[in-house]
Amino acid sequence: MEGPSGLLIKPDRGAVVSIRPVKRIVEAQPVVEGAGVKLRRAFGFGATDEFDPFLLFDDFRNEDPSAYEAGFPWHPHRGIETITYVLAGTVDHGDSLGNTGKLGAGDVQWMTAGRGILHQEMPKGDPSGRMHGFQLWANLPASAKMTEPRYQDVTSADIPEVTEDDGTRARVICGSFWGERGPVDGIAADPRYLDVWVPPGTRRTLQVETGRHGFAYVFEGTGTFRDASEPRSVRDEDGNIVTLPLEQTGNRSLVLFDRGDEITVQAGDEGIRFLLVSGRPIQEPVAWAGPIVMNTQEQLKQAYSELRNGTFIQPG
């Protein structure tokens, strides 16, 4: 039952929840990063308030090996966490601490850069040449920016997947959802990171806790996230009643939500698959240049000075 102003009354709980309205929908834009990798960026290197605690989101799906094989050679990070989710192909990685590994299809790496790390990420396509994946950057609060670097490498088999009666599926990478908890833990912003599939024609409401910033990134199919209402009927100039279709959101579209308790998605004819990401805002000053994010310009200058004089990597 729907109440005024987007409120949804749930008799079984005796509670009133609010459906999050959509602030805006943006298309991921082409950029070139690393040694010449062509990817799409949904947000990053701009104002951070609306996405806090998240800083950047890149979609590096490509089916042309020449567009990604140069990879991301050695580069630094400090003050952030990077989250890499691979859908197809592999990513070889190594760092200044001597860690090496390979991410395959369905795997996740959550890297906490902390006080500083140098690493490289080198993508390789599957037998068909496909390299599909995403990278999200999350900010660290001042109290955690100079902590010891660490990795959480998670294989696809260790990520729980829940399927509801209507066929909606969710892979729970981080946070709790539908009775499952993702394998990534100990993250400062207490984020939730889900990979959600909603079947064709299905309407689904998903909880996103109040007080968190949240967004969805669509990468398969189409659907609408506009609000909890059905398509609106109006009269045309001849007095006939016509139905206005809701705006469809498709591949490589990011949906930024306003405040509320839940989001509603109506899947299109092909179904819809999207990442649903939310986190608790850190609400601290951001001083950002390239792969290093601190709280003040002085801290940023110090980090780059250490990088130049060889003291960036600090012992435990």
Image: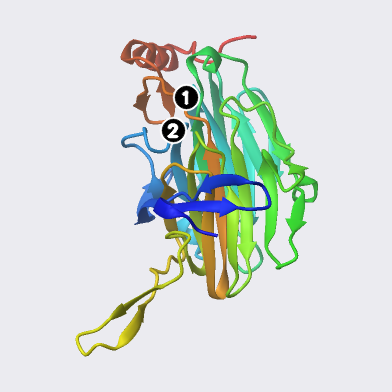
In the rendered image, the quadrant that contains the N terminus is: bottom right
Q: Secondary structure at mark 1?
A: loop
Whether residue 105 is visible, yes or no, is no
Residue at figure coordinates x 60%, y 74% from the top left = 200
The picture places residue 141, in percent across and down from the top left corner, at 50, 19
In the image, 24: left or right of 93? left
Residue at figure coordinates x 53%, y 19% from the top left = 116
The picture places residue 31, in percent across and down from the top left corner, at 36, 51
Q: What is the basis of the colouring in this image?
A: rainbow
Which residue corresponds to mark 1? 282
The picture places residue 159, in percent across and down from the top left corner, at 75, 47
Whether residue 306 is visible, yes or no, is yes
Please, is residue 300 above or below residue 175 in the view? above
Residue at figure coordinates x 72%, y 48% from the top left = 178
Q: Residue flagged by tag 2: what amino acid is it?
A: Asp
Q: Nearer the viewer, residue 137 or 53?
A: 53
Q: Nearer the viewer, residue 194 or 70?
A: 194
Which residue corresponds to mark 2? 52
Q: Secondary structure at mark 2?
A: loop
Please, is residue 93 above or below residue 197 in the view? above
Badge 2 vs badge 1, beta-carbon distance below 8 Å: yes
N-term-proximal mark, 2 vs 1: 2
The picture places residue 5, in percent across and down from the top left corner, at 40, 52
Please, is residue 291 above or below residue 35 in the view? above
In the rendered image, the quadrant that contains the C terminus is: top right
Q: Number of callouts in the render? A: 2
Marks 2 and 1, how far apart at CA: 6 Å
In the image, 202: left or right of 22? right
In the image, 273: left or right of 289? right
Q: Callout 2: few (<14), some (14-19), or many (20+) C-alpha neighbours within 10 Å?
A: many
Which residue is most to the right? Answer: 157
